[in-house]
Amino acid sequence: MKKRILSGMRPTGALHLGNYYGALENWVKLQDEYDCYFFVANWHALTTGYEDIADMKNNIYDVVIDWLSAGLDPEKSVIFVQSDVKEHAELHLAFSMITPLSWLYRCPTYKDQLSQLKERNIATYGFLGYPCLQAADILMYKSEFVPVGEDQLPHVELTREIARRFNYLFGEVFPEPQGLLTKVKVLPGLDGRKMSKSYGNTIALSDSPEMILQKVKQMITDPARIKKTDPGHPEVCSVYAFHKIFNPEGVAEVEENCRAGKIGCVQCKKMLANKMVGYLEPIYTKRKELENKRSYIQEVLHDGARKARQVAAKTMEEVKQSMGISYE
Ligand code: TRP
Ligand code: SF4
């Protein structure tokens, strides 16, 4: 029996390479070894974004199209949208009965976001309960592992605490899941800062080969290099960081030539762009193909929701029995 894993992403628009290397690439690999559930966390998106829903629908398609283009396979993994499986909302309600407020108030993401997203009104019941909903997502499928980035570990820990509390109060229903930390390949943005949509320094999976060439040209290199013969410091250069990922067989030579002042940045960037296009073009092509197939995407999601619901309904049956809600 394969072990089960579950993970989700909020639909915040087309994914960039940071998202790809931070999560999606890993999900694609996990598919063969695990029984995988991947879902679009659209209820979660509302917790911080309920005032700005104009793009939500398109964002759901964008994220699923990115997943499928990058290699998530509906034959191998259950791929669905959170709100399609009503049991998530139901289990969230059940957990809200037993989750102490203090656990939620002390969650680091709650404090951080509240101070960072000052322009939004997220001092809401729903936002405070974010980790409680995430616990419902995870425990619904009795997942053993949750592949996430480091920032999400507090939520996995809280999930374990909620599972323990539930089991203590009502009997053993939930296993305690573990976070599966992705060995993240760190990819800086075009300007050397962390790649992030809010910095406008990303390369997206939906960028065309021409766009990639354009963006690589703009990348910030070692400022100490003015002439080609100036010795370079690849460790401060984004282009070099990208070579490590897209050109593993050639990166040592790049480093040597850069330090020795034997290669110009223009040429170095050209080499990189070619490697990147070689790797990303198949994803881009698949993406273009899927963009016009909304009904196929819908089919995939409906089918995924149907499979997810079979597991979810069983869990909810157990939950209701053990909590004294059921009168059957
Ligand atoms: N909170 C996660 C994020 O922002 C998304 C998410 C929602 C999730 N439910 C989940 C991740 C369950 C893993 C498991 O990235
Ligand atoms: Fe960066 Fe390449 Fe220029 Fe060196 S030669 S500074 S690695 S772009």
Image (cartoon, rainbow, N blue to C red):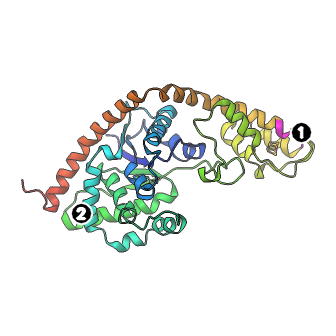
- Residue type for callout 2: Asn
Q: Say which residue appears at 39% left-offset and 40% top-offset.
A: 34
Which residue occupies the extreme left position in the image?
328
The mark found on residue 262 in the picture is 1
Does residue 117 appear to the left or right of 44 in the view shown?
A: right
Which residue occupies the extreme bottom position in the image?
102
* Structural crowding at the residue carrying mark 2, measured as other residues with C-alpha within 10 Å and reported as few (<14), some (14–19) or many (≥20): some
Query: Of marks 1 and 2, which one's residue comes earlier in the chain?
Result: 2
In the rendered image, the quadrant that contains the N terminus is top left
| Dot 1 beta carbon under 8 Å from ligand 2 | no
* Structural crowding at the residue carrying mark 1, measured as other residues with C-alpha within 10 Å and reported as few (<14), some (14–19) or many (≥20): some
Q: Say which residue appears at 73% left-offset and 47% top-offset.
A: 238
Residue 44 on the magenta span: no
* Residue that numbered label 2 is attached to: 167
- Mark 1 residue element: loop
Whole-percent x, y for residue 114 in the image: 49, 67
Q: Say which residue appears at 34% left-offset and 40% top-offset.
A: 2
Whole-percent x, y for residue 207 in the image: 62, 35
Does residue 59 appear to the left or right of 210 in the view shown?
A: left
Is residue 35 placed above or below 284 in the rendered structure? below
Does residue 299 appear to the left or right of 60 in the view shown?
A: left
Please state the extent of the stretch shown in magenta in the rendering. 261-266
Near-viewer residue (184 or 140): 140
- Residue type for callout 1: Lys
Near-viewer residue (114 or 251): 114
